[in-house]
Amino acid sequence: MPAIHLARLKQQSAQLVDLFDQPDRFAYALSNLFDLYSDRTHRPGQSGEPPSLLITYNLPKPVLRQVTSDMQMKAITNPSEILLLARRLWLEPSLEFRLLAASLLGFIRVETPEMVLDTIADWVESGVDDRLLAIVMNKGLARIRQDAPERLIEQIQIWLQSSDVNVQQVGLRALIPILSAAQYDNLPVFFHMLSPFVRKAPLRIRPDILEALRILASHSPKESVYLLHQNLNAPDNPDAALMTRQILPYFPQESQDSLRAALRGVAWHP
């Protein structure tokens, strides 16, 4: 791995950007650039993160950051070409290629959000690397969260209503950035989405459910207490008590006392 000279890196990135409307040539040139800066001495798991199932170049952070930054304006001014490029980059079984693809998708201003939503659905509904899924849902949906939040919420509802736990996880990962942004005009809608998962929480997606509840407990504790009370008293709720106990520490003391009283009145199913 050569030392990074910022001026040289900027020149290399600029040459790459010129190929934005030629997806195959761009992908080939990007592979060469990544090969040049790849850290081949790095082993998966050395830095504490779980190893990715994808090929990883282990690039210095400035490399991908420079390319992503230089591509942003192209994405804004040439949405159709960048959409095609993002789809082409995703075909490569490389973490860095797919991270760039997700970022490009999140830069695109589209008149019809379906262009982006359909692309993301194609990418993730069959299951992807866990770390990559979180990034795709955060970065890839950035523009739609800003420009078409109602349409995104509709899509999240569709994902969450799926019988496939992979697709349900996609919906939860798409919902979490919305909750984190504290845009709570749609609290009843969010509670309606999450209630089935409070009552029955599949083990695989339980951390995502708890993360969504944790954010709600932090930003809207009174309303979240009401949500949990409702589900503790609902029929067919084998996981409601367990989920309430696990989220309890994130509430203010007064809310914790209220929930503990409710828990004493129900059977706990471990």
Image (tube, helix red, strand yellow):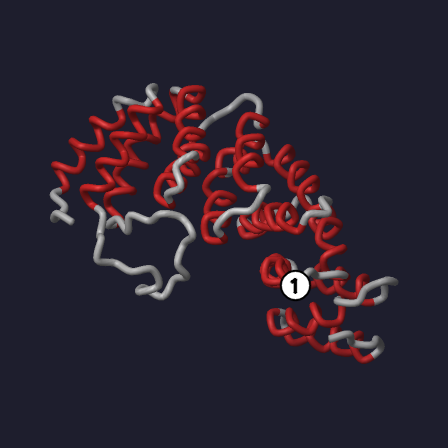
Q: Nearer the viewer, residue 149 or 85?
A: 85
What is the tally of numbered marks visible in this picture?
Answer: 1
* Quarter in which the C terminus is drawn: bottom right
Q: Is residue 188 left or right of residue 92?
A: right
> Left or right of 235: which side holds 178?
left
Seen from the viewer's position, the closer of residues 168 and 43 is 43
Nearest the camera: 231 or 83?
83
Q: Position of residue 32 (x, y in %)?
A: 22, 35
Give the residue displayed 16% in from the left and 31% down from the top.
11
Compared to 110, does 54 lie above or below?
below
Q: Secondary structure at mark 1?
A: helix
How far across and down, in percent of the image, does residue 265 sit? 84, 77
Identify the residue position indicated by label 1 in the image: 203
Give the vertical position of 218 relative to 131 (above or below): below
Q: Residue at x 75, y 50 (%)?
A: 192
Q: Is residue 48 left or right of residue 215?
A: left
